[in-house]
Image (tube, grey):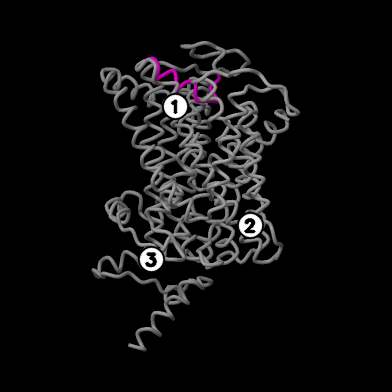
Amino acid sequence: MQGVVDFLNGIIWSPFLIYLCLGAGLFYSIQTRFVQVRHFKEMCRLLVSNKESSKGISSFQALAVSLSGRVGTGNIAGVAAAIGFGGPGAVFWMWVVAFLGAATAYAESTLAQIYKEEDEGQFRGGPAYYIEKAMGQKWYAWIFAIATIFACGVLLPGVQSNSIGNAVETAFGSGSMIDTGLGVFSFAKIFTGAVISIILGFIIFGGVKRIANFTQIVVPFMALAYIILAFVIILLNINEVPAIFAMIIGDAFTPMAGFGAAIGWGVKRGVYSNEAGQGTGPHAAAAASVEHPAQQGLVQSFSIYIDTLLVCSATAFMILITGAYNVHGSGEGVFLVQNISETIGANGPMFTQMAIESTLPGIGKIFIAFALFFFAFTTILAYYYIAETNIAYIRRTLKIDGMMFVLKVVIMSAVFYGTIKTANLAWAMGDVGVGVMAWLNIIGILIIFFLSKPALKALKDYEEQQKQGVKSFTFDPVKLGIKGATYWEQKLERNKNKAREK
């Protein structure tokens, strides 16, 4: 199985996808005149506007849901893997992906808002919706929807729960070994998998509002606690920070793991962590109640900064400052840098746990176990919501009862299975899911740009209203020449009818 999955990853994560991710980010950065820089102040202002409706969640809640997808295992174990296989220079390329990806995140999330729909009393939207409406290619939208249901409902949850299981086992011990039909596993992993599955079931059976209410409390708290701890460790080793910066920048252009390894691993783990271009963030973005689509695009763009420039950087500096890492070479058991035992794998949270433990003894293993639980668990919730949205998209055509219930059972089973299986296989399968979604979504948003430029038109319209100093923003897709934005057309018509009645 590992060999088959690795073969697929070799095809999906070819250099072409790496160039596509970086190229799309650069393209949208230029086309929007670097919206991620120009509108930074506006992003911060929109974060504190907390408007929600019976059909939609607030901008902040949507940010929390999408951040719960972005801030996860990739921020702890993913950064460790990038350093372990690509060297310290991979961190630089994660920063590059974040900066350019913020423009991609603006584009895809604005598209999700423009082409969202009302479904059973709540907003739904995402790549499948905007691919069908803006591209006019329903078959392509269906391929994305099916791939996303499989990736987010089956493949990706196991990556998150696997890291929780490994962290719990490291922090509290494995306990007795239990022989099951799936193999021999530790009591710690079986117990952890069962607990995660039960809590997950309680929340996902409550709907998107329960998911949003949970994540808007947990995500900011866990991210802040993690960054504060990292800041303490960096302060205790402040004299080493200039050398770490120099090492990251120097290795980025002369990669110690072979030419292109730092770029490859930095981009792969950067895309996995911040998800810009992957097509996951737009699902939460579409659920928000906003006055103008560009507003949620800007909020989602800001989430990339939080994920990579803050949380991922915190992990990277803890690992590099304390020297709690190895850098793997091209052959089995070959190391370009070996600071710790060769038995400690890079595909897991151990680098980060050891980094904290070396500076703050007795805290590292347990803190990371708890941090990973919240980081990864909220990401699993986001994955469920994304898979649910794509089933809702398919259900528009195939009226089959029970699809949502089946999804709930499948994702709970995938979470339990992922908790007890090996990390390498879980990560490799997750990479397949991420890669397929990224290919489909990035090609889609680039084609949509050349067909009608809806995200760019929305940005220009928003900026014009800003210049006019309007207090309440409006969005008229017909006036802008944007077709298929039925929700916004109907909303505008309702507002006109109310004005006439007055």
**Under tag 3, what secondary structure?**
loop
- Please name the residue shown 63% across and 21% down the image: 186
**Tag 3 residue:** 292
Mark 1 or mark 2, whichever is nearer to me? 1
The residues bearing labels 2 and 3 have C-alpha atoms spaced at a distance of 26 Å
The residues bearing labels 3 and 1 have C-alpha atoms spaced at a distance of 39 Å
Please give left or right for residue 188 compared with residue 482 in the image: right
Mark 3 or mark 1, whichever is nearer to me? 1
**Tag 2 residue:** 391
- The reply to whether the magenta stretch includes residue 35 is no
Residue 445 at x, y percent in the picture:
53, 56
The residues bearing labels 1 and 2 have C-alpha atoms spaced at a distance of 34 Å
Residue 249 at x, y percent in the picture:
37, 27
Quadrant, the C terminus: bottom left
Dot 1: within a 10 Å radius of its alpha carbon, few (fewer than 14), some, or many (20 or more) residues?
many
Image disc number at residue 224:
none
Residue 188: quarter of image: top right
**Tag 1 residue:** 368
